[in-house]
Image: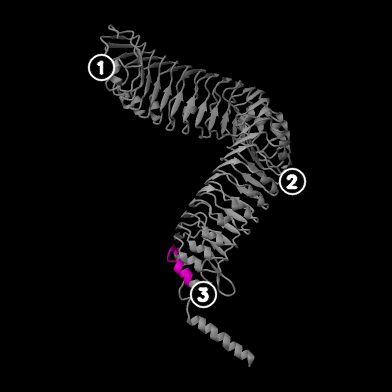
Amino acid sequence: MKLVFWHWIFLFFVLLSTSQGMSSDGLALLALSKTLILPSFIRTNWSASDATPCTWNGVGCNGRNRVISLDLSSSEVSGFIGPEIGRLKYLQVLILSANNISGLIPLELGNCSMLEQLDLSQNLLSGNIPASMGSLKKLSSLSLYYNSFHGTIPEELFKNQFLEQVYLHGNQLSGWIPFSVGEMTSLKSLWLHENMLSGVLPSSIGNCTKLEELYLLHNQLSGSIPETLSKIEGLKVFDATANSFTGEISFSFENCKLEIFILSFNNIKGEIPSWLGNCRSLQQLGFVNNSLSGKIPNFIGLFSNLTYLLLSQNSLTGLIPPEIGNCRLLQWLELDANQLEGTVPEEFANLRYLSKLFLFENHLMGDFPESIWSIQTLESVLLYSNKFTGRLPSVLAELKSLKNITLFDNFFTGVIPQELGVNSPLVQIDFTNNSFVGGIPPNICSGKALRILDLGFNHLNGSIPSSVLDCPSLERVIVENNNLVGSIPQFINCANLSYMDLSHNSLSGNIPSSFSRCVKIAEINWSENNIFGAIPPEIGKLVNLKRLDLSHNLLHGSIPVQISSCSKLYSLDLGFNSLNGSALSTVSSLKFLTQLRLQENRFSGGLPDPFSQLEMLIELQLGGNILGGSIPSSLGQLVKLGLECFLQPI
């Protein structure tokens, strides 16, 4: 009898609940769906005829049919979060990440007192983070990153001893980091980077003794880094790149667990701290652009897991420790822009995974070890502005990942490997101001990716390979001050070329009319050669040309009238040739000209007065021609004037 009695009681309550229709949580979700614009596969599944929402897409319930989770991540949801969210009293997990939700976080969210995980990241949310979220005392994971939140971080938010992960990066938050940060005693991850936070890092951070990750990069934080960080013995990641921290590194770790330690682009001074020698787990160490002094410590060679060592733009002195060669996993080594001396250790050849080697702007000298050039993973080697000597071995041409090799202002000698470029996807080559001899490698642009080729101020000879100027990716080519001969090759694929300097060589032949294909060219300097013939009328197709220097050649004929189409020209130098005709009327329409040099040619006739149009002209050189007549009054304001040929001087 008792069993039958309880059966009827249970049936009664089931019928009662059914007769009452949708549950309160279901009604709250339906109300919420009026402000959140749901995709059709969710909207059609959320049916008002259901007794509970527990079978709806994205909804999870407990044994009593109360909604405890709502996960609509990456579901193309838009609209905004309505206040009805606060009616879900049993909600533990709310994940709406990676959608297009906009508007504010409703204050009513603070009523979800059971919430443990909140993820609203990667949306279009804006406004302030409401202080009412401080009521979420059970919250352990908070993700609001990559939105447009502004204003300050509420003190109440950080007064939570259960919070373990806080991700607020990628917003527009300002103000100070709340001192209440120290009350998050369970905190493991604090990501605050890419905001506009200012002020100091509170010393209370030392109370977060379980902290493992602290990301502060790209803010406006200042002051000294608190010594209380020493209490956080399990800290693995500390990245404060691009702030304004000052002072020396005062904290230390005896049992160091650091894996990433980066303070680049701050105002840190002093020496690299000795306690770092305890950090055998270090994978990335970065102090770029600070005021560090002293020597690079030998203990860096103990970091067997190190992949990034970035110490550039400081005031470090002394020798490069050969022990760095023990960091066999090193991929990126930056020691540039310091005051380092001596030679590059041969031990660097042991860095078989090295892709980026930056040693430029130091006082390094001696032969650069040829064995380093055999590291197959090399991508960028920047050695410029040192005193390196030695040759480039042929093995350099075998590197299959090499993109950038910049060696200017050194004393390298010998022949550039003639196979350079055959195997490498080269993007930039700059060998300016060395003592290289021999020819330009003919296959240097085989990878069709070369953008910058600068071989000026060497002793190169031979002709310019036609394949060099037939390089569709090339933007700048500079081979000035060499011993190059032969004619200028035809231009076939030069649509991206913007700067070309072939000056101070012994090039001859005519100007190829095909240079009109270089439609982006802004500067041409072919001066101090033996180029002859006429200036092709195709010059008028170079409508982006700003500077043209063909001086000190053997050109003859008149200036083509088509040059008037080069309306952006501000500097035109055709001096020291054998050009003739009436020059000034041809160039008078170039209203942006500031410099016009036509001296030592065979221009003749009187001097018309077209200069009222050339309002920006500040230098005019016409000496050594066969001109006559009076000087127009409009020339009286020129800063520099060379008119030695005129009958009536000013």
Spatial CA span between label 2 and label 1: 83 Å
Q: Looking at the picture, how far across and down is residue 472, in whole percent?
A: 46, 33
The disc, 3 or 1, on the residue closer to the chain's N-terminal end is 3
Position above or below: 133 against 453: below
Q: Looking at the picture, how far across and down is residue 42, in whole percent?
A: 47, 66
Number of numbered discs visible in the structure rendering: 3
Spatial CA span between label 2 and label 3: 54 Å
Is disc 2 surrounded by few (<14), some (14 to 19) or many (20+) residues within 10 Å? few
> Are the residues flagged by discs 2 and 3 in contact, CB closer than 8 Å?
no
Residue 609 is labelled as 1
Q: Tell whether position 543 is magenta.
A: no
Say which of marks 2 and 3 sits in front.
2
> Which secondary structure lies at badge 2?
loop
- Residues drawn in magenta: 27-39
Query: Mark 3: which amino acid?
Result: Thr
Q: Tell whether position 36 is magenta.
A: yes
> Which secondary structure lies at badge 1?
loop
Query: Mark 1: which amino acid?
Result: Asp
Residue 52 is labelled as 3
Query: Mark 2: which amino acid?
Result: Asn
Q: Looking at the picture, how far across and down is residue 508, in whole percent?
A: 44, 16
> Which secondary structure lies at badge 3?
loop
Q: Mark 2 sits on what residue?
A: 255
Q: Looking at the picture, how far across and down is residue 485, in whole percent?
A: 49, 17
Q: Give the residue at x 71% y 40%.
A: 276
Q: Is residue 168 visible?
A: yes
Position above or below: 477 against 232: above
> Are the residues flagged by discs 3 and 1 in contact, CB closer than 8 Å?
no
